[in-house]
Image (spheres, rainbow, N blue to C red):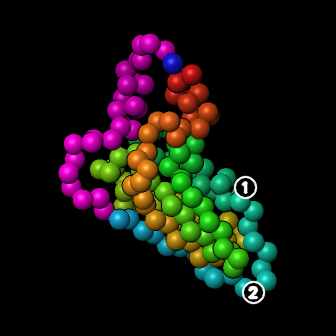
Amino acid sequence: MSEELDENEKSLLSAMSVDDTAQAPLTEYRAHAGQKLAQNAKLARMIDVVEALKTVFDPEIPINIYDLGLIYRIDQQADGNLNIDMTLTAPGCPVAGVMPQQVADAAAAVKGVGEVDVRVVWEPVWTVDRLSDDAKEMLEMF
């Protein structure tokens, strides 16, 4: 990582930081989308679900939520339903009420996905260490 960050990089990293001094209780955000699949329907491939999630972007950071490391868990059930745990870059994220629904809608749009339940979790706390190598490269963090 370069010793000196330009102003744009400082702004991006600041947008991704967590304010540890905030004492307000963390809000639980949930979102739902999709419909039950027909019995014996062909299930979606996880790679297709991941690609769909990569179409959702944090509006303050020009990197998709998957490469940002905001998706903690994708659990595909035998009936095609998905349970997704995600986090946000900070508890005060201005899109906290919108982004989980965007994730649910993107996943539900994949052929072979049934009902989708997205839950925002706060543990473990998100850090820049969760960025994918592609995301780090985009932010010139290597």
Figure check: 114 above or below 25: below
Asked whether 17 or 110 is in front, the reply is: 17
Q: Quadrant of residue 31?
A: bottom left
Q: Helix, strand, or loop for circle 2? A: loop
Asked whether 10 or 102 is in front, the reply is: 10
Q: Helix, strand, or loop for circle 1? A: helix
Q: Main secondary structure of the magenta part?
A: loop
- Residue 141, horizontal then vertical, whole percent: 52, 24
Q: Quadrant of residue 21?
A: top left
Q: Residues within 10 Å of mark 1 (few under 14, many from 20)?
A: few
Residue 135 on the magenta span: no
Asked whether 26 or 68 is in front, the reply is: 26
Q: Residues within 10 Å of mark 2 (few under 14, many from 20)?
A: few
Give, as a single range, the part of the protein colored magenta.
Answer: 2-27
Left or right of 75, for residue 98: left
Which badge, 2 or 1, comes first in the chain's sequence?
2
Residue denoted by label 2: 39
Would you say residue 109 is visible in this rendering? no
Figure check: 12 above or below 140: below
Residue denoted by label 1: 47
Q: Residue furthest top?
A: 3
Asked whether 142 or 23 is in front, the reply is: 23
- Residue 37, horizontal then vertical, whole percent: 69, 81
Q: Amino acid at mark 2?
A: Gln
- Residue 59, horizontal then vertical, whole percent: 43, 45
Residue 24 on the magenta span: yes
Figure check: 12 above or below 85: above
- Residue 29, horizontal then vertical, whole percent: 38, 65
Left or right of 21, for residue 62: right
Q: Amino acid at mark 1?
A: Ile
